[in-house]
Amino acid sequence: EAAVVRAAPSVGAVAQSKEMKGAIVEMFDWDETRQWRSVYDRNHRVGWMLLDHPEFGALLRPRCLPYQVRPVEPMVAAVLEADVRWLKDFIKAGMDVNVKDAGERTPLMVAAEYGRHGPIVVLCAAGADPGLYNFSDQTAADVAKSQVTKALIQALTTDKHFDSELCQEAIESLGGDVRELAEDMVGRKITRMRFFQSQDRKPATSEAKKAAPRPSGAPAQGPSADEEDDMAKLEEAHEKARQEAERIAAKLQRYRAEAAEAEVNAA
């Protein structure tokens, strides 16, 4: 009925206070074992709470989940909290990006299910497998919260056609280096698609033509009009985003120069 807040991340540490069942607790850092989270107790002191008790099971659950999941997978917890900082740290520490929780869900599946676009980008960049299945034989794209989320997953994990407008909507919801990473990954995909499409357009050798002539009236291979239009729209959106970033950087540089000049005048 209650979870103990201890002075250190150890079951032998002094108990500072208790949090009753149903209480909302704000989580902060993880300990080195990834089994404890730092919190503030009722007296505003820093304490530690155990996530998964060996006897009583999971003691805490993310607010967005209606049930407790045991064991508590740090990668999944970071996804649910949309905390890309911890997610990156876990990946750097060598944690498995395809680890599954008690529901046979990978971090990418959870990110897709709850529309966590930032974690989706970080996980895909780290090589998360989009083809794994859960208990219901569903992949990450199958459980995606929305078509926007699904378009982002398709753009980052396959070389197939995707909805560029929905993908751009997902990218625009991101910020900082995660957005830059997503734009770079999608940009490289477009480059690959254009390369292979150009290869499809190349004429066959004379011998190949003799051996297998193209039927009269058969259309030449190449991208469809919709695919070319989608790629053009996405490239245009990326160019606008780049120009906006340059404009903001120039404004920031001007503000800094004005501030420096004001300090000199004040001196």
Image: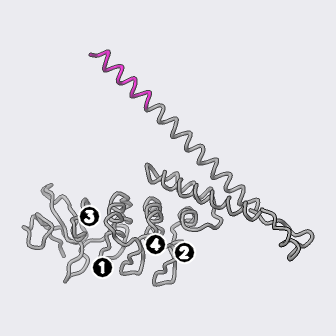
Instruction: Name the residue located 59 percent from the left edge and 43 percent from the top edge.
Output: 240
Vertical arrangement, residue 266 with respect to residue 135, above or below:
above
- Between the residue at mark 2 and the residue at mark 3, the CA separation in whole angstroms equals 31 Å
Which of marks 1 and 2 precedes in the sequence? 1
Sequence-wise, the earlier of marks 4 and 3 is 3
Q: Residues within 10 Å of mark 4 (few under 14, many from 20)?
A: many
Q: Nearer the viewer, mark 4 or mark 3?
A: 4
- Quadrant of the image containing the C terminus: top left
Q: Which residue is mark 4?
A: 109
Secondary structure of the residue carrying numbered label 1: loop
Residue 181: mark in rendering: none
State whether the magenta stretch is mostly helix, strand or loop.
helix
Secondary structure found at label 3: loop
**Residue ID for mark 2:** 142
Q: Is residue 77 left or right of residue 227?
A: left
User: Could you tell which of marks 3 and 1 lies nearer the N-terminus?
Assistant: 3
Separation of marks 3 and 1 at Cα, in angstroms: 19 Å
Q: Which residue is mark 1?
A: 70
* Residue range highlighted in magenta: 253-267
Question: In terms of secondary structure, where does tag 4 sit?
Answer: helix
Q: Nearer the viewer, residue 129 or 49?
A: 129
For the residues labelled 2 and 4, the Cα–Cα distance comes to 9 Å
Left or right relative to 243: residue 122: left
- The answer to whether the residues at label 4 and label 1 have Cβ atoms under 8 Å apart is no
